[in-house]
Amino acid sequence: MATGSTVPRRLIGRTLKQLREQSGVPQVKAYKLIDVSPQTLWRIETGQPGPKIREIDVDALCRLYGADDDTISALIGLVAETKSPGWWHDYGAAVPSYFDLYLGMEEAARKLTTLHGSLLPGLLQTPGYRRAVIWAAIPGMPTVEVEQRIEISAKRQERLTEDPADFSVTAYLCESALRWPIGGPAVMAEQLHHIVEASKLATTSIRVVPMGTTTPLPLIVGTFTLMEFPAYADTRLTEPPLVYVEGYTGALYLDKPTELDQYRAACKTLNATALSEQKTRQLVLSIAKEHE
């Protein structure tokens, strides 16, 4: 699948920011050179959707920062890729602005490791479950837009059928997320049977953190997704890992080494405390029977 403009935008922006900081060139000199506002320069450097990235501006900034010819060529080569919209852009307003960036990163990721304590991850949600979540969060949303969001979820889930060498997911689910009857008992029972079937896919590892565990780590850490990306042709431009933390009104993208280290440590603890895949299936099926 095409990953759209998200990753090349981030690669260009991150590299330009690194070059500027290493060169010591003031921000004011950079944004005046390409005739943009300070806010637009920030959006370019952080890979935000919106600002048009032009070859002439990338070349000018690189030369201002004293970049070598190989780096300049690599970045200019990426500019064309920023003009390719992702498939989710066809859905327009059905994709919240903060989620646009996430979809691009998810589409480009090679591996996801995620923890969900209350709601199940979108990659594992059935239409009935997803519909109930949307209407609970936004009761007045028109049915047409709700169904568009369900289509987006279905499109995202196509990645679960890819070659596991290209994409894989490890999902840690708190037992409490399995017991909350989202959409009612029938919807939840269907959802749990779907989880069992999804756990049999070669790309997917699903493990439950039981409520009887003595560590409160899942409650402390909260819901997150650690995203890792494939190596780029030019290894200097490979997208580094990042952690996505979604809130009620927006999201955080964490990529500092100290932040990544903390979440990797959390993943190790989760791996040690969660049930095996086989025991997870047994527990999920037993809870499904309770809903039934």
Image (tube, helix red, strand yellow):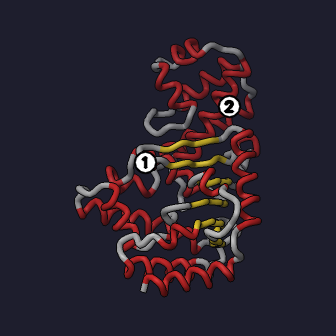
Residue 167, quarter of picture: bottom right
| The one of 12 and 214 positioned closer to us in this rendering | 214
Q: Which mark is residue 72?
A: 2
Residue 96 place in picture, x, y as percent: 38, 48
Left or right position of 132 against 225: left
- Residue drawn at x 47%, y 26% is 40
Residue 239 place in picture, x, y as percent: 67, 46
- Residue drawn at x 42%, y 86% is 292
- The quadrant of the rendering that contains the N terminus is bottom right
- Type of residue at label 2? Ile
Q: For the residues carrying marks 1 and 2, which lies nearer the camera in this image?
A: 1
| The one of 279 and 84 positioned closer to us in this rendering | 279
| The one of 156 and 213 positioned closer to us in this rendering | 213
Circle 1: is it few (<14), some (14-19), or many (20+) Cα within 10 Å?
few
Is 27 rendered above or below residue 243? above
Secondary structure, mark 1, is loop
Residue 23 place in picture, x, y as percent: 72, 18
Is 131 rendered above or below residue 51? below
Q: Earlier in the sequence, mark 1 or mark 2?
A: 2
Is 277 rendered above or below residue 8? below
- Residue drawn at x 66%, y 33% is 15
Cβ atoms under marks 1 and 2 closer than 8 Å: no
Q: Marks 1 and 2, how far apart in space?
A: 40 Å
Residue at which label 1 appears: 248
- Type of residue at label 1? Tyr
